[in-house]
């Protein structure tokens, strides 16, 4: 099924990315640049240098899914000093809504599980 949900985690790569990169190159950025597990099911967000293109890479059962949007006019606004977005913040980013002041109330978050290889 092609869908993103609020139960997923969304990580924004803060550096501009060459939008010609595809699955393998973006996966490399996730593992080396972010230090994350590309097969975790988390969604990774990449924005091009001109900020008019956005790619979202996510692992779903059986393979990668790459979402890509190119704006015909305007640019995406990058959140300041933020590498993690909520689902609602991602929707606002894609729709072009810029939030000037955000105050995030404390909510429960499940502790991140570490993946260990069997002996």
Image (spheres, rainbow, N blue to C red):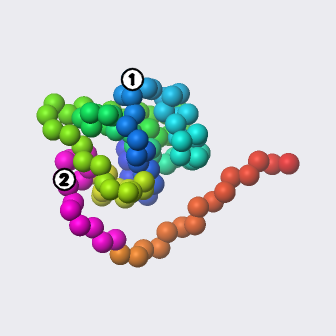
* x 48%, y 33%: residue: 26
Determine whether 103 is above or below 49 in the image.
Answer: below
The image quadrant where one finds the N terminus is top left
Residue at image mark 1: 20
Answer with mark 2 or mark 1, whichever residue precedes in sequence: 1
Determine whether 17 is above or below 42 in the image.
Answer: above
Could you say whether the residue bearing mark 2 is in a helix, strand or loop?
loop
* x 34%, y 38%: residue: 47
> What span is in magenta?
92-104
Q: Relative to residue 57, is residue 90 drawn left or right?
A: left
Circle 2/circle 1 CB separation < 8 Å: no
**Residue 33 x, y percent position in the rendering:** 54, 42
Residue 8 image label:
none
**Residue 90 x, y percent position in the rendering:** 31, 51
Q: Relative to residue 99, is residue 38 drawn left or right?
A: right
Return the residue nearer the eye: 86 or 50: 50
Residue at image mark 2: 97
Q: Check disc 2: other Cα within 10 Å, few if <14, some if 14-19, many if 20+.
A: few
Q: Does residue 93 belong to the magenta stretch? A: yes
Rounded to the nearest angstrom, the CA distance separating label 2 from label 1 is: 26 Å
Could you say whether the residue bearing mark 1 is in a helix, strand or loop?
loop
Determine whether 19 is above or below 97 in the image.
Answer: above
Does the image show residue 108?
Answer: yes
Q: Does residue 95 belong to the magenta stretch? A: yes
Return the residue nearer the eye: 56 or 82: 82
**Residue 53 x, y percent position in the rendering:** 28, 34
Q: Furthest residue to the top?
A: 20
* x 20%, y 47%: residue: 95
Does the image show residue 2?
Answer: no
Helix, strand or loop: magenta stretch: loop
**Residue 19 x, y percent position in the rendering:** 36, 28
Return the residue nearer the eye: 79 or 42: 79
């Amino acid at each position: 099924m092609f869908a993103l949900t609020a139960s997923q985690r969304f990580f924004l790569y803060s550096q501009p990315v060459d939008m010609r990169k595809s699955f393998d190159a973006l996966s490399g950025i996730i593992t080396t640049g972010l230090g994350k597990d590309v097969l975790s099911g988390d969604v990774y967000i990449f924005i091009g240098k001109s900020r008019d293109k956005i790619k979202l890479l996510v692992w779903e059962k059986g393979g990668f899914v790459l979402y890509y949007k190119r704006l015909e006019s305007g640019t995406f606004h990058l959140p300041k000093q933020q590498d993690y977005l909520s689902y609602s913040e991602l929707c606002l980013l894609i729709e072009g809504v810029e939030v000037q002041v955000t105050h995030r109330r404390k909510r429960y978050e499940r502790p991140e599980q570490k993946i260990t290889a069997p002996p």
